[in-house]
Image (tube, rainbow, N blue to C red):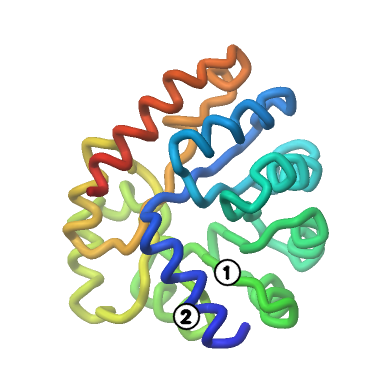
Amino acid sequence: MTPEARLGFRSRLCASRLLGILRDAPPASLVPLADCLMATGLRFVEVAMNTPDAPSQIAVLSRALDGFAEVGAGTVLTAEQARQAHQAGASFLVSPCLSREVQDYADRQDLPTLPGAFTPQEVWNAAQAGAAMVKLFPAKSAGGPGYVKELRGPFRDIPLLACGGVSPQTAGEYLAAGADALAFGGSVFSPARLARGDFEAIAADLAALFSACR
């Protein structure tokens, strides 16, 4: 994608700080969830492509959010998944690792990518491939905020999204260590919580995360 588009996406995500991950959300929960996201101010959300009928969920969320939030696809590993997600309305692609075919598709379509990385070499490879932001995954297993701080020594200019172990208790630590943004999923958007319509609890957790990020 163009450097300007990459920088624009990166700037918006860094300003928002938070990216929500939906996996196996009950379809009936999507529209009321969109209302919850708009009420709480979450501007970035992804639907994992290993969710049943993920492209349909991306399309439903995109319509329900109506431009309020940017809807992306997660767990994107192949060009075909990238194509399906993009056609459904995904505006960015997230992967657990660097997939060259996903990156190539994204470059042709001018889509931002957030490939996952664990080691310093993987962080470098993802950044060199053209990532809008590198997803440090799984951040908790890698060493949490301390590992982010270590990476910031050699990689001061590579934008990092910490994913794994993000909570209101750890969010501030990740940001202070040098993470540019944070991703979270099942701790807030559990399928069971969504199935019973517990949007008050979701809103409370989102508010706590936003407060920790400030």
For image coordinates 53% across by 30% down, the residue present is: 36
Q: Disc count in the image?
A: 2
Residue on which the image places disc 1:
113
In the rendered image, the residue lying farthest to the top is 196
The kind of residue tagged 2 is Asn
For image coordinates 23% across by 81% down, the residue present is: 154
Determine whether the residue tagged by mark 1 lies in a helix, strand or loop.
strand
Residue 131, above or below 172: below
Residue 184: percent from the left, percent from the top? 43, 43
Residue on which the image places disc 2:
125
Determine whether the residue tagged by mark 2 lies in a helix, strand or loop.
helix
169 sits to left or right of 165: left
Chain-order first, disc 1 or disc 2: 1
Q: CA distance from mark 1 to mark 2?
A: 13 Å
For image coordinates 75% across by 56% down, the residue present is: 89
On residue 69, the disc is: none
Residue 4, above or below 188: below
Residue 108: percent from the left, percent from the top? 74, 82
Q: Quadrant of residue 119?
A: bottom left
Residue 101: percent from the left, percent from the top? 71, 74
For image coordinates 26% across by 48% down, the residue present is: 213
Q: Nearer the viewer, mark 1 or mark 2?
A: 1
For label 2, count other residues whose C-alpha is less than 10 Å away and answer few (under 14), some (14-19) or many (20+). some
